[in-house]
Image (spheres, rainbow, N blue to C red):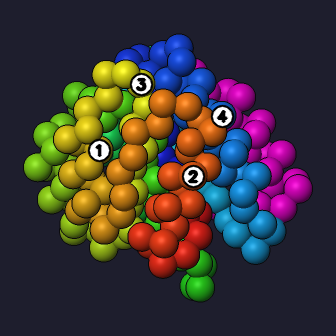
Amino acid sequence: VLVLDTSGSMGGEPIAHVLQSCGIVADLLDPRDQLAIVTFADHASVLCGLTQADGPGRDLIRRALREVSANGSTNMHGGIAAAAGILATAPAGLRRAMVVLSDGQPNVGMSSATDLAGYVRGLKVAISSLGFGLHHDEAVLDAVATAGSGRYAYIPDPVIARVELGRAAPAHGGVVA
């Protein structure tokens, strides 16, 4: 599950980079994989439930991503909780992992690195995080990834997301989606 920060602080280049990164991820997957997209701002929303990454599935994912815009506050806890719910109901045999794409500036719900890390540890779900924007909060994003037994990386350019998602995969023992 890709968990996208669509809050107002992600406006402009950061949200554009997140959306481009999601397209890159969809292209990396093969038809045996499934991908879901969750967004969070004031509240979390499931933009796209678990979708097979075949041709029609990729088209559905791309159409859903075109509807994304940045506004509102940052409820990272809500986004992670929604993604965990999707993973809890995923079919047997699928790897249960999520990647949070954010500037790491939560201000609704749990907002401290310590609280979010404690919540993530209780989920028993693999979580990595990617930081977007020059003013991203590395401490929050690293705490979430460490608690989720994953990796954190700053993404100054969407092309780097391809590399970092490749690095995150071994941290979770397989494909991150």
Q: Which residue matches tag 4?
A: 20
Q: Which mark is residue 163?
A: 2
Asked which quadrant contains residue 78, the reply is top left
Q: CA distance from mark 1 to mark 3?
A: 13 Å
Give residue 17's position: percent from left, percent from top: 57, 29
Q: Report the span colored magenta.
A: 50-70
Residue type marked 3: Gly
Q: Tell me whether the residue at label 4 lies in contact with that at label 1, contact meaning CB atoms closer than 8 angstroms.
A: no
Q: Is residue 68 left or right of residue 120?
A: right
Q: Which mark is residue 141?
A: 1
Mark with earlier residue (4, 1): 4
- Residue 52 drawn above or below residue 137: below
Q: Looking at the image, which residue is at 36% across and 63% down? A: 150
Q: Is residue 57 visible?
A: yes
In the image, farthest residue toward the bottom: 93
Q: CA distance from mark 2 to mark 1?
A: 18 Å
Number of numbered labels in the structure image: 4
Q: Which residue matches tag 3?
A: 133
Q: CA distance from mark 4 to mark 1?
A: 20 Å
Asked which quadrant contains residue 13, the reply is top right
Q: Looking at the image, which residue is at 49% across and 61% down? A: 167
- Residue 119 drawn above or below residue 7: below
Viewer-nearest of discs 2 and 3: 2
Give residue 6's position: percent from left, percent from top: 47, 28
